[in-house]
Amino acid sequence: MTDIDTKLREFLARKGIAVAGTSERALRREDALKRVDALSRGRAAILGGDVHYVRGTGLESAYADWHVERSEGESESEFLGRSCETARKYIRTFPERPGNEPAFVLVTSAAPEGTKMLTEEQTLLLQHVVEKRMPGEAHMVHHAVQGTLTREERERICMAIAAEFAESGIDEESEPTGEGLKLEGLLDEIDRPNLAASRR
């Protein structure tokens, strides 16, 4: 863990307001903007976020959010800069009304402490699928782990996982094998952002 990672997590623990029922913490506008700046310096993309209203010592959902995806042909560095600028603009311009102070939860490509975008087992399984069915595109594994896949890349990976499942993930009675269940879990994890975007 880098010094920047440690400072970011300490800042979130100190300034953040707990979101009930989750491990997430929301930040008031000024603190959220400070965290965006820190994440930008730490080279972490901001994939989107949710908005809540401060209610005493707790929060109430504002039913508002934003979402950013890496565009086809966009470098990781370009995406990082655009994602952070999108977050800054959204946070700065989100309306504040009397009695409704907003607080923001940031979703980043830097996974929270103790978590990863994919487990080690899922990463190894994805490497196997990509090497077998998408030769020459090993970089997509890195993008998947960092949470910076484009929609098209996710769709292509999902097709490769589905093909692997059809070939080696079911038994003679068309029931998922142990490997098939792992492939199903990996498919769900990779496709999660697409499913979330389709509900917006």
Image (cartoon, rainbow, N blue to C red):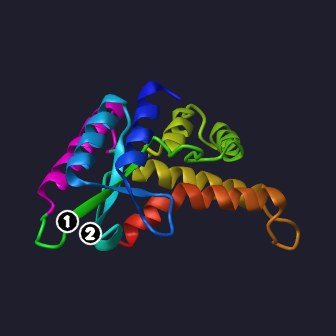
Disc 1 designates what residue? 101
User: Dot 1: few (<14), some (14–19), or many (≥20) neighbours within 10 Å?
Assistant: some
- Queried whether the magenta region covers residue 91, the answer comes back as yes
Residue at figure coordinates x 49%, y 55% from the top left: 155
Q: Is residue 121 left or right of residue 6?
A: right
Q: Of 96 and 56, which appears nearest the observer?
A: 56
Q: Report the amino acid beneath label 2.
A: Tyr
Please name the amino acid that badge 1 sits on.
Glu
Given residues 177 and 164, the one toward you in this image is 177
Q: Residue at x 29, y 73 (%)?
A: 63
Q: Position of residue 104 (x, y in %)?
A: 30, 57
Q: The magenta stretch spans which residues?
A: 71-94
Asked if residue 33 shows in the view, the reply is yes
Under circle 2, the secondary element is strand
User: What residue sits 73% from the left and 57% below the top?
Assistant: 182
Residue 74 can be seen, yes or no: no
Q: Residue at x 64, y 54 (%)?
A: 161
Q: Are marks 2 and 1 in contact (CB under 8 Å)?
A: yes
Residue 31 percent location from the top left of the image: 26, 47
